[in-house]
Amino acid sequence: MRVESGEWRVECFTIHSPPFQFIIVHCLKGGLYKRMSEENTLLVSHTENSTELLGPYRRFVIWVHGCCFDCEGCLAENTKNGSYTAWKIQELAETIASCDVEGITVSGGEPFLQANALYAMLRQLQSLKEMGVIIYTGFTLEELRRKDDCNRLLSMTDLLIDGRYVRELDDGRAYIGSSNQRLHYLSDRYKTVGQVYYAAAKRRAEIKFTANQAVLIGVPSKGVLDVWQKIKEKAGGMSGDF
Ligand code: SF4
């Protein structure tokens, strides 16, 4: 069910197996919106067990489902409109802990729309295995600091990359979408290695194929982006616009 009125859109939907009901309240004017879901469940568009393209060292990556922004040129449309999995946070934490990675990167979609569930998952994860945490968000740090649940999630975050993607400000910087986006070292963990990693001259990204999906990992250069657009045109229904 979906109802839209003025500034607000309310969506209600049910997943039958396992049985969950979700209500999502969107603020259409771009402010924070609340996702009210089971706190022990995280809605995830895609995961990747190991990559070095979204932060220093080998990382597990989660692309969360859902975003409240509408950045022109968004490369992650599929995380807004495509399919997703409702992960139990315990199960997701155990899956990540079993991987040979230094840490986790959370992208999207918009991670802070599920701040409570993500916080709970990271707590579970840290109790199983100590890991570094990097989060890409469309909100600015100042916007996030106004919300208690977001502050709680920030307290678990080592490095935050913030701000909407602005196509006109896309200057080709490695690992960052546009020049307005900032790196906030919220702990010392990546301060030294991050200076080198994010100063890299070239963007790196890869396109990975699975049985029924193509997945774009990393922030693409113009060349990779052109290839990606051609793949999508040819594939027709193929999803995986991450
Ligand atoms: S914040 Fe990210 S996922 Fe959301 S619309 Fe902007 S670029 Fe796309």
Image (cartoon, rainbow, N blue to C red):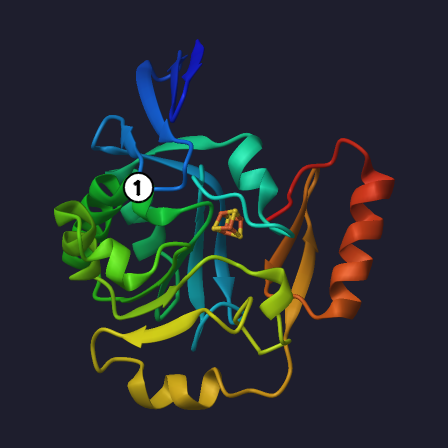
Q: How many marks?
A: 1
Q: Residue at x 67, y 37 (%)?
A: 239
State which quadrant residue 29 falls in.
top left
Where is residue 169 shown, x and y percent of the image?
59, 69
Q: Which residue is mark 1?
A: 32
Quadrant of the snapshot with the N terminus: top left
Where is residue 224 shown, x and y percent of the image?
75, 65
Position of residue 201 in the picture relative to residue 212 (left or right): left
Q: Residue at x 33, y 60 (%)?
A: 140
Residue that sits furthest to the front in the current view: 6
Position of residue 149 in the picture relative to residue 65 (left or right): left
- Rendered view: 46 above or below 223: above
Q: Residue at x 45, y 90 (%)?
A: 196
State which quadrant residue 162 falls in.
bottom left
Amino acid type, mark 1? Leu
- Rendered view: 113 above or below 72: above
Q: Residue at x 21, y 66 (%)?
A: 130
SS assignment at label 1: loop
Position of residue 72 in the picture relative to residue 88 (left or right): right
